[in-house]
Amino acid sequence: MIADNDEFTFTKIESEFPELEEYDCLIRVEYCGVSHTDLLASAGTVPGHEVVGIIEDVGLLVKNLEAGTRVGVGWQLSSCHACKFCESNRENLCPDKKSFKDALLGGFGEYIIWDARFVYTIPEEIPSAEIAPLLTAGASVYAPLKELSIMPTSRIGIVGIGGLGHLAIKFAKAWGCYVIAISSSLNKKEEALNFGADEFMTISANRETLESIGQLDAIFSTVSVPIDWNNLLKLLNPYGKFIMLGAVPFPMTVDGNLIINKKISLIGSIAASPECIRSMIEFVAVHNIKAEIELMEMNTENCQTAFQRIGRNLARYRIVLKNLKLDTPDNSVEGDHEIEEEGSSHEDYKDN
C-alpha cells in the first residue's frame, strides 16, 4: 500500500523486485505493526517497519538465515559496517545508517527486502502479532534497561501510558524494577496497574503526593507533549537518569541547578542495536511480554484507519495489520484479537 498524501490515503500498487544483493533477505510479510514513525514516511512511499514474516529467499552472503524461517525486522534497514559505532555493535548510531524510509518497499505490502544483518529470528513460542510492535517500540524501551545500568532493584518512573509507555511498564517490571506509572489522565490508572505498575500518579499531582512516592533512580519519558520537566526532575535521586524516549518537537526548559546539584543525567535513546534487539527477543520469550494490540486486516481502508487512529492518539495501544492473503503459522496469534473493520472505534486512549 503506497501512501498518497497528508490525508493518510493509500493506493494499492504492483511492483517488481530487483535481484537480491549479497546480504539481502526477501521476506513475505504476515504482520506489520503501525507506529507514529510511519506517519513521517513521505508521500509516494510504502510505510511499515515492525514486520514479522517468512523468508522467501536470501542473498549469496547470507549464512545464518534461510528460506522458510520466521523472522522480524525493526526500524533500521542497514548501516555502513565500517565506522566506530558499527564496529562496537552500536549500528543504530551509525552516521550512515538507513531506516525503513530508505527501503524499496515497507511492511504495508506482501514482501520486503531487508539487510539480513538487521533481520531477527523469532522463537517458536512468541506469537507473531504480539512481537511485531516490540521490534521497534519494545526494543526502544528495553535498550535503556540493558545499556544504562538500570538495576533490578531500581525505582523507575514511566511518564506516558501509551504505545511506548505501556511497554515500558511491562519491560521494567519484568526487569525487576519497582515501577511508578505517571500520566496526565486518571483514566489510565487501572490499566497501568494491570500492566504491572506498582503505583500510579498524575503529572498534576500536588507536592505532597509527589513527595510520598519517594525518590526515583530513573524516569523514562515516552511523551511528545510539553509538561513540567522540572517537577519530574525533582523526583530523581542523586545520579538519577532522565531518559527521553518520546520525540519532543520543541525546546525543553529545565532548571540547571536541579541537574547540577543532584548530578542528574539527561539521556536520549533511539531504537536499539541488532545485538540489543536479539537480547530483547530472548527476554520477551522468557518473560512472556506482549504488546496490547488492535488487529486489522491489511487493506487500503484499514491502512488509512490505522494512520488516522494513531495520528489522533486513539490507538489502544498498538495497531497491527495482518496480511490475510497469506498463510500464517499456527503460533501467529495467541488469544482473541478481533480483526477491526474500517470505521471501528474504541474509547479515547491518548498517548500520554
Image (cartoon, grey):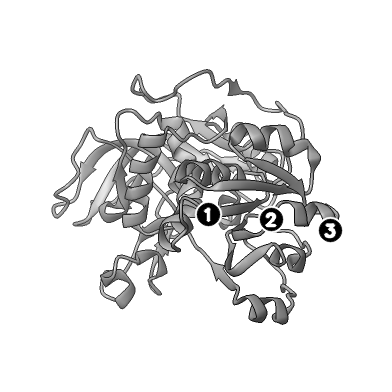
Q: Say what amino acid the circle numbered 2 marks.
A: Gly
Q: Circle 3 sits in a helix, a strand or a loop, which is it?
A: helix
Q: Say what amino acid the circle numbered 3 marks.
A: Arg
- Residue that numbered label 2 is attached to: 214
Q: Earlier in the sequence, mark 3 or mark 2?
A: 3
Does the image show residue 107?
no
Spatial CA distance of label 3 from label 2 is 12 Å
| Residue closest to the eye, 270 or 117 | 270
Q: Circle 1 sits in a helix, a strand or a loop, which is it?
A: loop
| Disc number placed over residue 207 in the picture, else none | 3
Q: Which of marks 1 and 2 is nearer the N terminus?
A: 1
The quarter of the displayed image where residue 84 is located: bottom left
Residue density around tag 2, few if under 14, some if 14–19, many if 20 or more, within 10 Å:
few
The residue depicted at 18 percent of the width and 57 percent of the height is 22
Does the image show residue 293?
yes
| Disc number placed over residue 146 in the picture, else none | none
Spatial CA distance of label 1 from label 3 is 22 Å
Taking the view exactly as shown, the residue that stands out farthest to the right is: 206
Looking at the picture, how far across and down is residue 196, in whole percent? 58, 36
- Residue that numbered label 1 is attached to: 154
Spatial CA distance of label 1 from label 2 is 12 Å
Q: Which of marks 1 and 3 is nearer the N terminus?
A: 1
| Residue closest to the eye, 247 or 142 | 142
Looking at the picture, how far across and down is residue 304, in whole percent? 64, 39
Q: Circle 2 sits in a helix, a strand or a loop, which is it?
A: loop
Looking at the picture, how far across and down is residue 36, in whole percent? 61, 50
Residue density around tag 1, few if under 14, some if 14–19, many if 20 or more, within 10 Å:
some
